[in-house]
Image: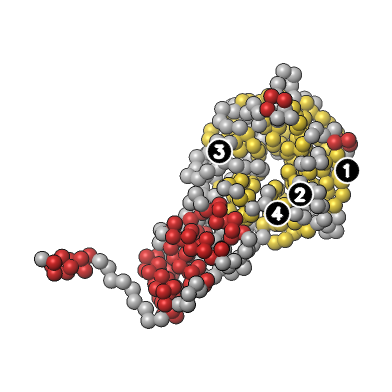
């Protein structure tokens, strides 16, 4: 009876692939990956690790790649973490074949480790994103290029804008309630506007650049909770000269504006992190008005998709807000879309800096045609230091660490 059972088990168990040495295992593994046979790819990659030298990073990465494609996502994450702890540069944060691994709860922690050792432009393992059955989340961005380094030891950035015409960055300094300008060419840092010159309150909490009209909009605030108050300021982009100070409506009560955005028609919107409200400043107006109240979470950032639709980041996730009909709907997603400190929109995707598990992630969230369902986010960059970013015509810029602005080229 035992012999019969063993015979039947052999019939049901597929034969394991065999290979003679590391080179043979890797050659067969690559062939399996090309034809989309990812389980065989996994088995052969594992055999290569067993036959190779101990802790060979190239073999370990190829095994992680095979684990990701064959559905062994947790195993792949463990292997990637081992490589990151060894200081090995890998491309798992941008390689499409690891998209399902990036959905795991612990990915942000591992991504922060990976960010300390940027990957070279070419991947170590063969990219199987075009093979049958491979996960594909779109074309990954190029590795980040260092754009600008500057001397500003006392600067604590809270928001960033990029003026493509003058090739300057405008940085909000949270601690000093001032704006500084960093020249992209000369790298010089100069004061642009201060509380004394522009009437800012204690903290700068939002920046929006209206390149079409040559204006810069700033939200400033003081106090917290029931003592909070805010103002929206309009500055001339070229000079930093104060043009307008827009107050909240009478009877608003406590309000802390945590984000500001400008629509194509010139309407300015700001979101209140205390009362979960959207305020609006119409073109030509001198005082904000309440546009609507939100029913989900505390707002943390806002972006305009067009003249009518906004996206608001809240403590409960992302909202699609139609200010025309005064309706909002939560953006559906399989992953956590909270923790956004900044948010911007372009061509059906949201870009921003997201805080997750002690890391700061630069992410792109592509949406469906209706704008209410998110595809798996793409993590474009990650780090452990606070970061602020902005979307520009030629990519996404973000302040990463002391005195460095990096650019992600978006393809």
Residue at 75%, 40% in the rendered image: 207
* Quadrant position of the C terminus in the picture: bottom right
Identify the image's colour scheme: rainbow, by chain, secondary structure or one colour.
Answer: secondary structure
Q: Toward which corner of the image does residue 255 lie, by quadrant?
A: top right
Reading the chain from its start, which is encountered first: label 2 or label 3? 2
Instruction: List the residue tagged with mark 2.
Output: 162
Front position among marks 4 and 2: 4
- Label 2: which secondary element: strand
- Label 1: which secondary element: loop
Cα separation between marks 1 and 2: 15 Å
Marks 4 and 1: in contact by CB < 8 Å? no
Marks 1 and 3: in contact by CB < 8 Å? no
Instruction: List the residue tagged with mark 1.
Output: 239
Residue 212 seen: no
Cα separation between marks 2 and 3: 27 Å
Cα separation between marks 3 and 1: 37 Å
- Label 4: which secondary element: strand
Between 232 and 199, the one nearer to me in the picture: 199
* Quadrant position of the N terminus in the picture: bottom left
Expressed as whole percent of the image width and height from the top left, the position of residue 380 reads: 61, 55
Expressed as whole percent of the image width and height from the top left, the position of residue 306 reads: 65, 38
Cα separation between marks 3 and 4: 24 Å
- Classed neighbour count for the residue bearing mark 2: other residues with Cα under 10 Å, few (<14), some (14–19), many (≥20): many
Decide if residue 403 is on the left or right side of residue 374.
right
Q: Looking at the picture, does residue 120 appear above or below residue 156? A: below
Instruction: List the residue tagged with mark 4.
Output: 400
Cα separation between marks 4 and 2: 15 Å
Instruction: List the residue tagged with mark 3.
Output: 317
Reading the chain from its start, which is encountered first: label 1 or label 2? 2
């Amino acid at each position: 009876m035992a012999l019969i059972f063993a015979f039947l088990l052999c019939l049901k168990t597929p034969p394991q692939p065999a290979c003679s040495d590391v080179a043979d295992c890797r050659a067969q593994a690559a062939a399996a990956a090309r034809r989309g046979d990812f389980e065989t790819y996994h088995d052969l990659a594992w055999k290569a690790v067993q036959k190779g030298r101990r802790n060979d990073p190239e073999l370990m990465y190829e095994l992680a790649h095979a684990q990701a494609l064959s559905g062994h996502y947790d195993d792949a994450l463990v292997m990637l973490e081992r490589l990151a702890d060894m200081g090995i540069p890998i491309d798992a944060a941008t390689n499409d074949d690891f998209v399902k691994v990036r959905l795991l709860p612990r990915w942000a922690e591992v991504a922060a480790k990976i960010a300390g050792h940027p990957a070279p432009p070419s991947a170590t393992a063969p990219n199987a994103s075009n093979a049958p059955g491979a996960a594909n989340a779109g074309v990954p961005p190029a590795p980040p290029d260092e754009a600008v380094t500057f001397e500003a030891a006392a600067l604590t950035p809270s928001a960033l804008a990029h003026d493509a015409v003058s090739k300057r960055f405008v940085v909000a300094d949270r601690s000093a309630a001032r704006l500084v300008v960093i020249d992209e060419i000369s790298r010089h840092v100069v004061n642009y506007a201060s509380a004394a010159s522009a009437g800012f309150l204690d903290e700068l909490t939002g920046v929006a650049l209206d390149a079409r009209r040559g204006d810069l909009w700033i939200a400033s605030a003081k106090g917290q909770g029931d003592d909070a108050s805010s103002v929206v300021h309009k500055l001339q982009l070229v000079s930093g000269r104060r043009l307008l100070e827009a107050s909240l409506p009478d009877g608003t009560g406590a309000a802390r504006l945590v984000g500001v955005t400008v629509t194509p028609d010139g309407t300015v919107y700001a979101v209140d992190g205390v009362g979960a409200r959207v305020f609006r400043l119409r073109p030509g107006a001198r005082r904000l008005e309440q546009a609507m109240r939100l029913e989900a979470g505390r707002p943390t950032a806002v972006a305009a998709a067009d003249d009518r639709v906004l996206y608001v980041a809240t403590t409960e996730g992302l909202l699609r807000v139609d200010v025309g009909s005064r309706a909002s709907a939560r953006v559906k997603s399989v992953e956590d879309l909270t923790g956004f400190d900044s948010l911007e929109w372009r061509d059906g995707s949201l870009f921003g800096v997201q805080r997750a598990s002690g890391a700061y992630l630069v992410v792109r969230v592509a949406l469906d045609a209706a704008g209410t369902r998110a595809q798996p986010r793409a993590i474009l960059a990650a780090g452990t230091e606070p970061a602020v970013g902005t979307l520009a015509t030629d990519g996404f810029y973000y302040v990463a660490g002391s005195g460095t602005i990096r650019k992600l080229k978006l393809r």
